[in-house]
Image (spheres, rainbow, N blue to C red):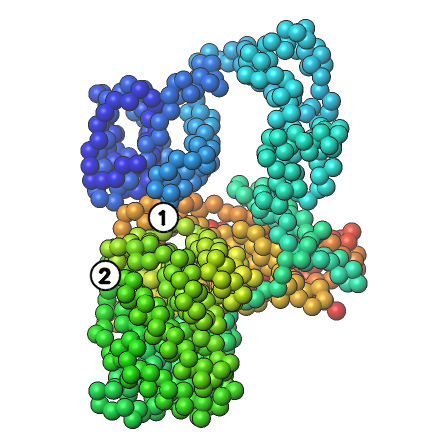
Amino acid sequence: MERGPAKHQGIHPSYQFLYVVHGTAEVRTDEHSLQLHKDECVIIEPNQSVLLSLASADSLVAKYYFSDDLLAETFQQLELHSGIEKDDLSQHSPLKRVVNQMLHYFMQNEGAVDYHVISLSYETLHHVTMIYGNDSSQVTKQTVRESSIKAYIKKNYRHELTLSTIAAEFEMSPSYFSRYFKQQFGTGLVEYVTAYRLKQAAEKLKRTDEKVSLIASETGFSNLSNFNKKFRQQFGLTPKAYRDENNEFLAMKQLPVNQSQTLDALQYFSEAIAPVDYIKEVSLHSAEKMGRNGSPWATLINIGSAENLLQYDIRHHLTLLKKDLNYEYVRFWNLFTKGMNIDPDLTEDYNFDKIDSVLDFFMDIEILPFIELGYKIRRVQRSTKEAVVYDNDDFKFSLNSKEWQELIEKFMVHVTYRYGTENVSRWKFELSLNYSSESEFLEQVKHYDRTYKIIKKYAPKVQIGGPGSKPQNTGKYNFREDLKKLAQKGIRFDFISYMLYPYLEDEKGERFAKMIDDPSFLAHKLDEIEEAVAYAGYADLPIYITEWSNTISNRSVINDTVNKGAYIIKNMIGVAHRTSGIGYWVGSDLFGEFADSKAILHGGTGLVTKRDLAKPAMHAMRFLNFLQSNILSIGPNYIVTKGPGDDFSIICHNYKPLHASFYQLMKENEVKIDELSEYYVDSEKKAFSFCLEGAASKRFELKILRVNDVYGNLISGWKDLGYRTSLRKQDIDYLSRVSDPQVTYEQLHTHNGKIKTELVLEANEFVYISLIEMK
């Protein structure tokens, strides 16, 4: 991988495949000069002197080497169309896709080479040879014979294959064929056929729910015991264990079928791996119980500082969020500041009127407070390195101070009297620990413990949690070991809380944090948290991710896109049954308002804009709330749920990760609206299919809600208005209309006891599907 601006010169004994990921590059050999732009590629012959010049700091070129010897392992006399003729890789989508997948994985893992990289490398080589290969020998007789033998085995592996049968097919004696086969293929015929059969069996175990005995028979094993033995020797697992570990689309612990229902079950739900016309069905016919949909996304939403909640616009947005998404809790912070009339330098006879105003408002809209007791300095971030706003400290209380303890005592006396102990007991308190040394850690632990005891004295049933830190931080602490220390010190939590943002922060601090290129960061980090909680001895406690998003930037175009909605869907369906609550960061774009946010869309982290317009992220949350209570199946791109009777709700998405070059080249706030699509790994469509098996006379209403580049996308409407910052009322009305998802209805009838429908999703599109029995 080469980045610019720079020049790189040298001679390499292998073929060079150069691909411009971003920007512009110049390639020179002894005789030629060539300009390459984004998505263009060229193959350079071995032993050529090559000068590669990268035009600018954001230029990125991938270099892929492969030797004549490697080609000769498969082809006797294969040559590649090389020289100095460029090609447009966008015309060869399979090659472009696998090259980008390899680069994405390679850069995500900081250049580490593993078997997955090797696998993608060989797949890249396959496409290169198919597109640019030229067999100068016009294919030898030897190559034809080897290909014919492979094709014969592939066609007949399900049946009995003997040495004498195959030898006769190719007009050889059994002994000569045996020697020939081993010489050409490097293994004996029996071993080769067995390995091929096991490979096919493994694919069936991953892709179907067929019985193991049937799979053994279909792949040429007449004896189940022998199949089990051979399979374990090859893969180190029994067939059943292999299916449990590798079945990505099938055995997701679905619900059992209620035999008393007239509709037997949601039998098929599937997703297609590109190309679009390939649809892989996943059977739910023998579904096992997976669990209940806990709807953790609807538990809490972050809104900002308590002082912000004195503003009408913030209250209006929180009212909308409560009405549309029915959040149970609103998480906020900085309750005890000068802006809230709490200043021990002036008086310790505290005036709680402003606090009462906020809490009374919560009572009015029937939402419960989730109070972070720690202090957060207001920051509106462009990126980790740059803040638009960085307010001064407005907090007057020291750790473990007498003033703090007296404040908490007076506050608890006040709220239990005003709102009643029973009501206060439904609130949640969190006290986050933020430390950079062992002494700070010990001081904050003592501060938490004393605060916990005071609150519990007045409301014994109220829940108080922590430590509220960032487990992706590698520089200041080891969150796993520190959680263990807290347990050893007897620190009591009623719930465990953490904040998750995909940034790796080391000893240099947050300003030098590196974005983590992992679209499944939430699920992967939750795995670590669950393990750490069990290790520390807090395994029985609920886990809350109190802050979560894929960016902290309030000026990132990602926040306004359909891609952000698809990202939310992808991550939320993966943790639907795994955590008690996840607090999206944040509810309203008003949180990041400042002098530079005049535009209707300015990259804010909220679900709604300052003019009450729903962003794709808001639609994603709405779709999630439409899901039913019982989970039938979860896959990488879908979730299937079932409600009472024969009502089904399905969400599917075609999320496209950002290419690794996005994280390597620039600050996240510098990407323009019309540039972001250049950084998606690919733009391919994805096809889905689902099928219901039930009574022959059933009728269903099919409702589909779509959010894509055309529907439910504010950016599309704003583009129509020329991205103007000055908008009239009719402009806002227009944006409100185009920001609604597309809705279609259809009545479906069973045919031979089945209902089947299919749909194709554009890049980053996400869809909600409702299927309701018509009475």
- Residue, disc 1: 679
Q: Is residue 594 above or below residue 13?
A: below
- Please identify the quarter of the rendering in which residue 259 is found: bottom right
Q: Of the residues shown, which amino acid type is indicated by label 2?
A: Glu
Q: Nearer the viewer, mark 2 or mark 1?
A: 2
Counting residues from the start of the chain, the first of labels 2 and 1 encountered is 2
Image quadrant where one finds the N terminus = top left
Residue 324 place in picture, x, y as percent:
50, 74
Circle 1 SS class: helix
- Residue at 42 percent of width and 20 percent of height: 70
Q: Of the residues shown, which amino acid type is indicated by label 1?
A: Tyr
- Residue at 32 percent of width and 70 percent of height: 444
Residue 8 place in picture, x, y as percent:
22, 31
Residue 540 place in picture, x, y as percent:
54, 65
Residue 157 visible in the displayed image: yes
- Residue, disc 2: 386
- Neighbours of disc 1 within 10 Å: few (<14), some (14-19), many (20+): some
Name the residue nearer the viewer: 32 or 222. 222
Residue 584 visible in the displayed image: no
Marks 2 and 1 in Cβ contact (< 8 Å): no
Circle 2 SS class: strand
